[in-house]
Image (cartoon, rainbow, N blue to C red):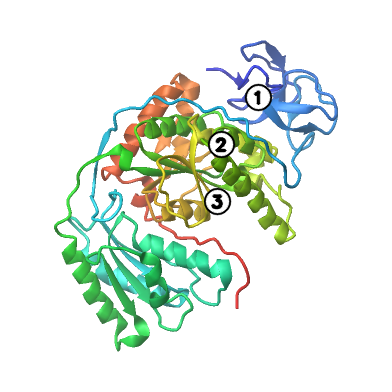
Amino acid sequence: MNKLVQITPKDLVAVALMPLQAGETIDYGAGTVTLLQDLPMGHKVALRAIRKGEPVIKYGFPIGEATQDIPEGAHIHTHNLHTLLSGKKEYEWHPIHPGQEKKQPAVFQGYPRKIGRPGIRNELWILPTVGCVNDIAAALAHRAQKLAGGPVEGVYSFRHPYGCSQMGDDQENTRKVISALVKHPNAGGVLLLGLGCENSGIEQLKPYLGDYDQNRIRFLVCQEVEDELEAGEKLLEELAANMQADRRTDCPADQLVIGMKCGGSDGLSGITANPTIGVFSDLLTAMGGTTILTEVPEMFGAETILMDRCGSEELFGKTVHLINDFKAYFESYHMPVYENPSPGNKAGGITTLEDKALGCTQKSGSSAVKGVLAYGEPVTTTGLNLLSAPGNDLVAATAEAVSGAQMVLFSTGRGTPFGCPVPTVKIATNTPLAQKKRGWIDFNAGRLLEGMTLGELGRELLELVLQVASGKQTKGEENGCRDLAIFKQGVTL
């Protein structure tokens, strides 16, 4: 097994694939380097002397500039490397129009819906319109567990603190999220549970639903009934009865929408797990399927790579707005645009936002960008889509589900147990994490460093996605990890 990897021939650094000790002389393919300090796994070493102020190259692009002279063999990290990013930018489109050979769609066993794409789960959901009824929703879910079994693959409620005391875009976000989840294909039945006096009540949400299958949705306003638990149980029983005829049937993979997210990243994320997801994305979109890439603040520093892959000048313009509007969001709250990476990222070897972004965008593969989505906007264009949402794991993964993702692929180098409203597949960047947290991790991309190829891993990940889409539970589902997080903007009344 190699000890160091130089990702591209242009790179001035190599990344440790295991913990290394000072004094070791190590072959990295194009040469050798002698380490001047201990090097933790995922961290960077200088392959030649780098002058103060000189750009440091990784992934073939600058990830910052040296803040001091760095000798060959030295550890490069926060003590001697600083971001080059600042403020809004003017962008030019340099289209590359990547080609993609179309492939025959694979097949999964899903639940066809009268309206929209098939579901990969057939669950009974209780969605509160407002946080005031969260505990009522939880109590109803507890009572309704007797309905689970057979075609009803589970009964779940989703807590959130919003739905009232909101204004403007902030309130609009909540309405978009709740109404989109009401119609999500993974839910075979939905009880929309309101209080009765909130800003975003059932009557306010109904116009957002548009055309929907009336057999799948029921409404309950708690203030309008004497016993909301009794009334809710009856409605859930009706929904469960309507679900009894549902059966998994063959569905083409071009009907899949898969979200792509990373969190708890480390220095191997952009070398193993994220490129593996990128291969998967290219395979699925070649079949006519759809993938969604989000966490816009973690595109900063690598955004031009995505812009140049936009399929039209109009999409390029939307991507420019996607980036600059998110920078304006930071600035409107007088916050630094580049307050990233996190402490855990840095401990794992990521130094600057450019370093993180160049690794993060590996999940997009090499296909053309076919769509750019606002927060809460449903995906309508097949292929690779970019979605406006922050980097926060729960908020971003929920946003992908809201836009139509039936599943989320989540790469991690540090490990995390969370799950969003849809199955969340955890992909480890390294074998030690996969072995240590077997109860969290579904797929080990660290095997790339042990002899497997990216192509092999990408195809294996596609097979896992098809299995999960056909009913195989993720570790997060087995552990009961299901959360909902809405993007909060603006004041609270």
Name the quadrant containing residue 127: bottom left
Residue drawn 40% across the image and 65% down it: 179
> Nearer the N terminus, badge 2 or badge 3?
2
Name the quadrant containing residue 213: bottom left
For the residue pair 234 and 78, the one nearer the viewer reads as 234
Amino acid found under the numbered disc labelled 3: Ser
Element type where label 2 sits in the image: helix
Amino acid found under the numbered disc labelled 2: Thr
Residue 1 in the image, given as x and y percentages of width and height: 52, 17
Which disc number belongs to residue 361? 2
Q: Is residue 350 visible?
A: no
Choose mark 2 or mark 3, whichever is in front: 3
Name the quadrant containing residue 187: bottom left
Residue drawn 44% across the image and 59% down it: 483
Q: Which quadrant of the rendered structure holds the C terminus?
A: bottom right
Depicted 480 relative to depicted 279: above or below? below
Q: Which residue is mark 1?
A: 60
For the residue pair 36 and 167, the one nearer the viewer reads as 167
What is the C-alpha distance between the residues marked 1 and 2?
Answer: 13 Å
Q: Which residue is mark 3?
A: 388
In the rendered view, does 53 fall on the left or right side of 44? Answer: right
Choose mark 3 or mark 1, whichever is in front: 3
